[in-house]
Amino acid sequence: MAFADLLEQVGSTGRFQILHVMLLCIPVLLMASHNLLQNFVAMVPPHYCNADSNLSQSQLSPEEILLITVPLSKAGKPQRCQRYVAPQWHLLDTNGTSTSEENYDGFLQGCADGWSYNMTGMTSTIISEWHLVCDLRSLKQMGQTIYMGGVLLGALIFGGLSDRYGRRILLMISNLLMAVSGTCAAFSPSFPLFCLFRFGCGMALSGLGLNTFSLIVEWIPTRVRTLTGTATGYCYTLGQLILAAIAYFITDWRWLTLAVSLPFYIFFLISWWFHESSRWLALNNKPEQAVKTLKSVARFNKRHEEGEKIDVKMLQESMKKELSCSKRTYNALDLFRTLKMRMMILCLSATWLSTSFAYYGLAMDLQKFGVDIYLIQVIFGAVDIPAKVVITVCMSFIGRRPSQSGALIIAGVTILINLLVPNDKQTVRTCLAVLGKGCLAASFNCCYLYSGELFPTIIRQSGMGWVSMMARVGAMVAPMVQLTGDYIPWLPGLIYGGAPILSGIAAVFLPETLGTHLPDTIQDVEDRGSGKRSKCQASTKEAVILQDTKVDLLKQAV
């Protein structure tokens, strides 16, 4: 008997697993809201320079004041960052028929008296409140980079800590940190403090993602891993649609930030109910707690008699080989201990980094498409639904490796093609961007499941923490790359498109995991595909062939 058999004995797909997965997936809905929150709280409204205070008190209408104080851009709209040193009174005599090509008396200057904002979408944003425009416009990207820096640090910290102290306690801490940091961000009196608390939100998001994934995958059998992983991905997709709806009705950035943060206080209370992973408890020399947890699950699944048969001796006997290989302490350095592990971590790092880099390069600059921002947010979110159905079918039928590689390469090619489409073809450009974003969302869905199946249990959280860290490096760099567009307009698209293609090629060198059991030790990883039985691998019935359930998976996914 192996651990998978013990899980089957207490019920591997019973009421406990259903409720457990459902409750873990609810916070994922709002994780998307925090990740993409800047699309709305940092929306850049149309703006132009304020007129001199004396002129503002004149009898002229606002339209007339704007005409004589602010020059027009080449597009025929008021310039955002310049005004005339002196009012151009003669423009009033020409009935406002001025062009941007005319030479006016005087020189242009910056917006010495601030800016006026046309708040058509949001009634208030951090851009309008702290005037992050013109010379300070790069602070918008810096704010998102700082948030992703928090996600990066969180991946480093929470990944290792949860392998050492458990998944449940770190999940509770992450929920509380998200609630408190989000609340403080909503009441921030300055931009630096806002960035500081958003940094805390980013750290919490990493802890939530990593520990939610592990608690889900370590309580379910192999045969439903693909379906469950896809369902979790759909929660993130639905969260993007929920964000658009919340932002549509809550148009003040402070209340919007508060609205997506307060529910985490409730999630913190709910997380007290979660059971620690018995697999983790057993491998960390806590057999009594592991047995207690298994019996609790058995009672919840109405398998009292089967649960009472489990004792410490049975648990240790079923996992004695895994336990003999997990007596020493493991850390992140074990990810690079062997050649196979080094190759695997290198390819996975490239895959995660480029997926996140290109994903946030597209998803965090919605205003450039010239479409209503609420509509484009819904479209960008909705495209994930068919994308994840397709990737689920591909992962179940043709395998994880070709699915991962194909999604990345198609996404990269789509982004590169978009560079060739003229700027006035907004519909075509938007459609190509939506297709590319869908492929990247599918790649993300595959990344989580595929990586979880590649890393052994003893360092799974450290491994997931590492690749998540690489993803956040990509997400941190993505906003900065957008700034290069001010100098070379086509350069961001070239970088966003080239990175996924290169990493898609790297993914070809990863081993296939379709229908295989979860490796528990590093030796299991070394022996994967060799035909040998690991000395540290217990005989197991967990390696259920997914081919027999492909039709069921397809029906449920659709």
Image (cartoon, rainbow, N blue to C red):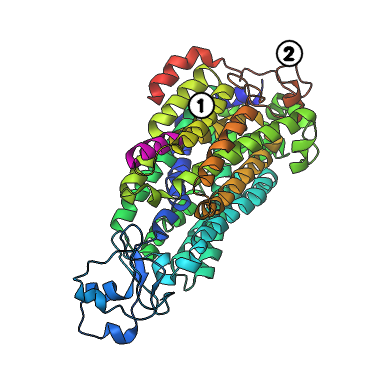
Left or right? Give the position of 59 relative to 55.
left
Left or right? Give the position of 43 relative to 333.
left
Sort mark 2 into few (<14), some (14-19) or many (20+) by Cα contacts within 10 Å.
Answer: few
Sort mark 1 into few (<14), some (14-19) or many (20+) by Cα contacts within 10 Å.
Answer: many
Q: Nearer the viewer, residue 42 or 453?
A: 42
Mark 2 residue element: loop
| Coordinates of residue 106 in the picture (x, y in percent) | 39, 78
Residue at the image point whose x is 35% and y is 59% from the top = 74
| Coordinates of residue 459 in the picture (x, y in percent) | 70, 37
Q: Which residue is mark 2?
A: 531
**Residue type pointed to by label 1:** Thr
* Label ID, residue 476: none
Give the magenta range: 425-436
Name above or below for residue 476 compared with residue 143.
above
Residue 544 lies in magenta, yes or no?
no
Residue 426 lies in magenta, yes or no?
yes
Q: Main secondary structure of the magenta part?
A: helix
In terms of image quadrants, where is residue 60?
bottom left
Task: Let me know if residue 530 appears in the view.
Answer: yes
Quarter in which the C terminus is drawn? top left
Left or right? Give the position of 410 relative to 426.
right
Q: Which residue is mark 1?
A: 226
Residue at the image point whose x is 77% and y is 36% from the top = 336
Name above or below for residue 281 compared with residue 392.
below
Mark 1 residue element: helix
Count the marks.
2
